[in-house]
Image (tube, rainbow, N blue to C red):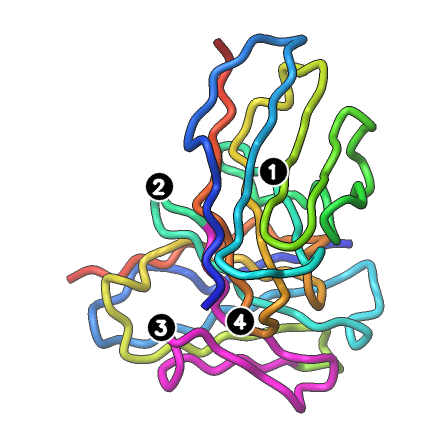
Amino acid sequence: VQLVESGGGVVQPGGSLRLSCAASGFTFNDYTLHWVRQAPGKGLEWVSLINWDGSYTSYSDSVKGRFTISRDNMRDSLHLQMHSLTSEDTAFYYCARGTRSYDHWGQGTRVTVSS
Amino acid sequence: EIVLTQSPATVSLSPGETATLSCRASQTIDTSLAWYQQKPGQAPRLVIYDASIRATGFPARFTGRGSGTDFTLTITGLEPEDFSVYYCQQHKSWPRITFGQGTRLDIK
């Protein structure tokens, strides 16, 4: 099982970024997937989830209305479109596999919101 | 929102000793609790799920207990590779999953 995030970088406040997570080694469309983030030196925060076929999504209050999670089951990939970014969104973003607990995580991609 | 409070924030122990990490939920979560280990610069790893089931790759010295609001992760006979930060996570209020703030297990 492998999850590999990409798309992180430095973005100005108010900007947008699209994160991706490429999956391999398992049947991608059997699993719910999540994004979990970790601000520098801080704990873990659940961000969003999407069910196996994309018909159900959910977001934390801190990102609702600004972030959109999606998946492409043909390409075994997960995405997080982020808009209206603020310094509060600066964090490592991990994709994680599982419905209620996460048995596999990617290595993370760093997002820095700074002018 | 279900708040998870972990204690202590930091604990310093020597190899061979026993660590007992606590996680308390602000309301009952049955056994809907997982524990993760995170080493510096790495992603978290699942240690325990459903409060007491050990995940693949973790030895029997890791034990999870509890139900309702009070949970513990006990690590007996600490090995050097066990010194990490540990987080608890609840999914009773799925999809609103929450994590504790973490306990740092340091080598004395």
Q: Amino acid at mark 3?
A: Ser
Secondary structure under badge 1?
strand
Labels 2, 1: one chain? no
Residue at the limit of the structure toward the left, as seen here: A115
Query: Would you say the residues marked 2 and 3 are in contact, meaning their CB atoms lie under 8 Å apart?
Result: no
Residue A79 position, x and y percent, is 55, 75
Residue drawn at x 61%, y 22% is B19
Question: Can you identify the residue that label 3 sits on?
Answer: A62
Q: Earlier in the sequence, mark 4 or mark 1?
A: 1
Q: Residues within 10 Å of mark 3 (few under 14, many from 20)?
A: few
Which one is closest to the eye, mark 2 or mark 4? 4
Residue A38 position, x and y percent, is 42, 52
Residue A30 position, x and y percent, is 82, 74
Labels 2, 3: one chain? yes
Labels 4, 3: one chain? no
Q: CA distance from mark 2 to mark 3?
A: 19 Å
Quadrant of residue B65 in the image? top right
